[in-house]
Image (tube, rainbow, N blue to C red):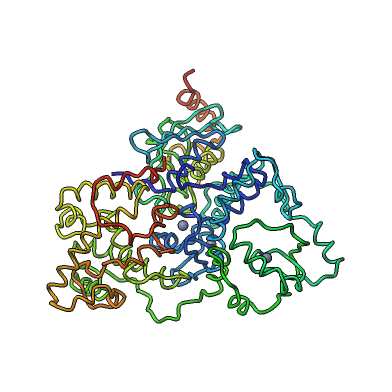
Amino acid sequence: MASLPKRIIKETERLITDPVPGITAEPHDDNLRYFEVTVEGPVGSPYENGIFQLELYLPDDYPMEAPKVRFLTKIYHPNIDRLGRICLDVLKTNWSPALQIRTVLLSIQALLASPNPNDPLANDVAEDWIKDEEAAKQTAKKWSKLYATPKQ
Amino acid sequence: MNGSITDPTDFRETELPLFSQLDSLLRCHICKDFLKVPVLTPCGHTFCSICIREAINKSAKCPLCLNELRESGLRGDFLTGEVVNCYQNLRQPLLERIQKVEEPTVAGSETSLIEIESDGDRERISDIEEDFQILATNERKRLPGIKKITKRPASRKGGSKSNIESMFKSGVEMGECPICNEFFPVKTIERTHMDECLTRQALGKPKPKRSVKTPFQTSNRPSSVDSIASNLKYGENGAQHLKNYLESAVNDEKRLRLPKLDYNTLSLSQLKQKLGSLGLPSFGSKQSLMARYNHYEMLWNSNFFDSSSPVNENELKRQLLSWEASNNLNSNNNNNTIGKMITKNKDGERTYQKLLFDFKSDKFKRKSWIRLFRRMFQTLIKEAKSKMQDKATEERDSDKRSDAPVSEDYQTLIPQPESNVASSTAVLALEDAQSAVKTPLDTETPSIESKSGQNPDMNIS
Ligand SMILES: [Zn+2]
Ligand SMILES: [Zn+2]
Ligand SMILES: [Zn+2]
């Protein structure tokens, strides 16, 4: 049975009435703790023009515990692995209950704008990135076109 | 009004969108609601007592700046508490008065000390700025992660200089009225203004045209704060917040802080003993006993050390009970829980489930809850009575009960009628603005009709 604290209701309301530019997040009909998320690739990054699907889940302990977020769209990024799991401090050790869904999604968007191959989750991608950044960015661009282009 | 959910953005489309920042400042960054029993951390941040204690249990850091933080470092912040309470009373009438659609009121057309920004878009930007700012502040504490997030635009200047200069020129000795916080010549305050001000508030009349105002010279008070406090004739709502603040004081340590327990070195029977000595029930698995103690410790320390108007132990136990029921702590394999006791009765079962659900879905209705429990409390009272074979006169005297020795049951939880109503500092985060709370329960006849949970006024969505 899902409990829905006031804070979650509020956050949801604001996400819908006052969305963050380039980001959408909508709760699932059956489970108000489960959100379908899209993030636009930041301008100037290899992910530009891509629209990435993510899923976000608020655990029972939220906001004492961080939301669980995962990319559903395939993406070539040193801090995101094949399963779409994200290596981002605010989702792990640096989670704080003062953060919220908006801030998490903004951080993810920022991570797309500035990948950090020195703290990798996807080791092979990180290696490529360090070896030849330009080539890696080209691959990222290609993947974005291939997997993250909205169908009409 | 669509329920009790309010948001700083409610001020966006008003004459004074800057209020959305004030509204934001008076909220807790953990629950995003207005600060309830606020506490100040050593790093200078303020949260609800319960919220920050819960957060510290998870991670001993300040949620805003990530500095290390211990529960023992928290201090109750009475002033902020009363400011928030006062603001909450003002909020709705204020919103109504500064709605843009209405014709400008007298107050709206006056020159204000606050710089008016009518541009809604700028507020929108500053909202996202706030998100970024929290991230950025936290970021300084972090390992290298995200690099630059955003540049904050140059900060805007609030306030204006106009009135201040003219004040200096006038050379009148000014003082601040402690009731309406406006500035007047000290003599006026002493002679006539305070009386006027109190009467006006008691009658609920609007303020008259102000005289000059200045943010300076606040020290020129007519007399000491204490004597003002004792001389005030408080109206119904008039100076209540001021009074609360002036009369609040740190706990005189009559009571001890409940310590954290080290469950690794504590046997089950020792744990039961510990709970028993606090008058708490000792049934349930070790895990539920631990959870029970942890939550009670939080309620206790928050209530007796952070709150400016602590409730008594019985009320704390009632809060613990509500929390346990809503968290289904014992529901799995134990027949001895309150929930189970109630659900033995068929009608009770339905009502209980409904209430439990409402509680979780934020539609909790306290009146029905207590009504439901009243039947059970009465049964418990009867049992206790027949066991004790004692004088019936003790039943109402529940204050003494709070210090009663070990109890195997929730017998000590029998709520006193006053404490049901008066828990102004109730820690149940769910019930704050719900109107149901305000109705005195004494007049209710005990009943567990299943329709009790269906009043339309409790619906939020
Ligand atoms: Zn809070
Ligand atoms: Zn701090
Ligand atoms: Zn006054």
Please report the residue visible at 33 percent of the width from the left and 50 percent of the height from the top. Answer: B359
Q: Residue B157 placed where, x, y %?
A: 73, 53
Q: Residue A53 placed where, x, y %?
A: 44, 31
Q: Residue B416 placed where, x, y %?
A: 31, 68
* Viewer can see residue B68: yes
Question: In which image quadrant can residue B231 be found?
Answer: bottom right
In-front residue for pair B236/A60: B236
In this view, which residue lies farthest toward the top? A152
Q: Is residue B343 above or below residue B190?
A: above
* Viewer can see residue B265: no
Q: Is residue B53 left or right of residue B93?
A: left
Q: Is residue A36 left or right of residue B183?
A: left
Q: Is residue B172 above or below residue B288?
A: below
Question: In which image quadrant can residue A73 be found?
Answer: top left
Quadrant of the image containing the C terminus of chain B: top left
Q: Is residue B314 above or below residue A31?
A: below
Please report the residue visible at 47 percent of the width from the left and 49 percent of the height from the top. Answer: A90
In-front residue for pair A1/A45: A1
Please report the residue visible at 80 percent of the width from the left and 59 percent of the height from the top. Answer: B163
Q: Residue B306 placed where, x, y %?
A: 46, 70
Please report the residue visible at 26 percent of the width from the left and 67 percent of the height from the top. Answer: B414
In-front residue for pair B208/B239: B208
